[in-house]
Image (spheres, helix red, strand yellow):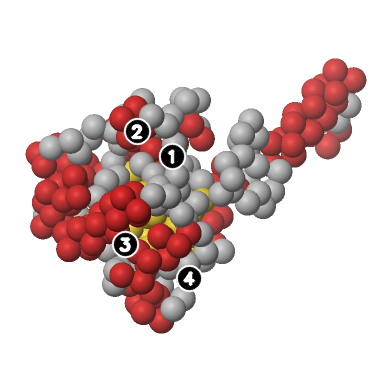
């Protein structure tokens, strides 16, 4: 048993001690290795892989096969961090499909799954937890529901919306989630949620008062430069670094500078 391995109980203990949880998304072996080296506590193989890696406009086309492929790659990094995999759109529409697909993600190497939705997903969450599959809830702005809601809309701006977010949080806690992502939610409402549940809240676009924070790694690395959502802070400009490297290589090939003697065999 690895004593440094983070499990769902360690995350709950962090909330109790008032320690912030750092979470990031990863979709491949190498990125997961590097973020694990700095001690991130939760790695999410998000269905954001659809935009971050696969060139889709949103998360809806992402399949179970996509999620399994990327979850296996990240699991090979054997992270100390808790490894959570997203259940993609329609993969948990019923209790039966939730159990079947949740099981497939665990067998691919995930240690928990994430499910979008609150009160409407309670039966699926209960069934998964009952079957031994830890569940990370996801409330507030739900990217898998954009067709129904009409887009990426910040939640908690009206009393009804705030009430709904709070009800969803309470229902998920009762159903047994070990933590919940709060996405795209007015900061004061996310703060109220964080105070009202005993499980950790992990915010993304939900202000500073959640128990932890998560970002899509491609956004914070500056790999996805066409659009930067308001909630993202950029910690690097990797797309510019890549552009410079590719251009320098092309120049060297064209001028005959590469390969030089150092890269040739005598
Ligand atoms: O898919 C994803 O990356 C997510 C995070 C934004 C929480 O759900």
Q: Can residue 69 be seen in this view?
A: no
Q: Nearest to the eye among marks 3 and 2: give it.
A: 2
**Res. 226 image quadrant:** top right
- Mark 3 or mark 4, earlier in chain: 4
In the image shown, does 176 or 69 lie closer to the viewer?
176
Pointer 1 residue: 153
Up the image or down, 260 lies above or below 208; here it is above
Q: What element carries label 3?
A: strand
In the image shown, does 100 or 123 lie closer to the viewer?
123
Q: Where is residue 102 in the image (x, y as percent from the top left)?
A: 21, 45
Q: Where is residue 81 in the image (x, y as percent from the top left)?
A: 42, 62
Q: Residues within 10 Å of mark 2 (few under 14, many from 20)?
A: few
Pointer 2 residue: 149
> How far, Cα to Cα, is label 4 from label 2?
31 Å
> How far, Cα to Cα, is label 3 from label 2?
24 Å
Side of 125 relative to 159 (left or right): left
> How far, Cα to Cα, is label 3 from label 4?
13 Å
- Mark 1 or mark 3, earlier in chain: 1
Q: How crowded is mark 3: few (under 14 residues within 10 Å), some or many (20 or more)?
A: many
Q: Is mark 2 on a helix, strand or loop?
A: helix
| x 31%, y 30%: residue | 148
The N terminus appears in which quarter of the rendering?
bottom left
Residue 179, numbered circle: 3
Q: Residue furthest top?
A: 254
Q: Nearest to the eye among marks 4 and 1: give it.
A: 1
Q: Can residue 148 be seen in this view?
A: yes
Pointer 4 residue: 20
């Amino acid at each position: 048993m690895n004593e440094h391995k983070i499990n769902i109980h360690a995350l709950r203990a962090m909330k109790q001690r008032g320690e912030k949880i750092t979470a990031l998304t990863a979709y491949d072996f190498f990125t997961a290795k590097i973020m694990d080296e700095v001690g991130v506590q939760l790695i999410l193989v998000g269905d954001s892989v659809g935009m971050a890696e696969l060139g889709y406009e949103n998360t809806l086309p992402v399949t179970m096969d996509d999620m399994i492929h990327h979850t296996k790659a990240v699991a090979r990094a054997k992270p100390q961090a808790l490894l959570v995999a997203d259940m993609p759109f329609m993969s948990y529409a019923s209790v039966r499909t939730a159990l079947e697909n949740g099981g497939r993600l665990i067998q691919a190497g995930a240690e928990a799954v994430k499910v979008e939705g609150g009160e409407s997903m309670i039966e699926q969450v209960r069934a998964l937890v009952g079957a031994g599959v830890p569940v990370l809830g996801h409330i507030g702005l739900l990217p898998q529901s954009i067709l129904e809601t009409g887009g990426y809309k910040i939640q908690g701006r009206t009393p009804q919306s705030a009430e709904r977010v709070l009800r969803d949080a309470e229902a998920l806690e009762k159903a047994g989630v070990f933590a919940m992502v709060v996405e795209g939610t007015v900061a004061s409402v996310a703060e109220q949620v964080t105070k009202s549940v005993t499980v950790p809240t992990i915010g993304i676009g939900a202000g500073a008062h959640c128990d932890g924070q998560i970002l899509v790694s491609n956004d914070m690395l500056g790999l996805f430069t066409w659009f930067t959502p308001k909630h993202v802070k950029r910690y690097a400009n990797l797309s510019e670094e890549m552009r410079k490297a590719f251009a320098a290589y092309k120049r060297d090939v064209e001028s005959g500078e590469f390969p030089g003697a150092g890269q040739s065999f005598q």
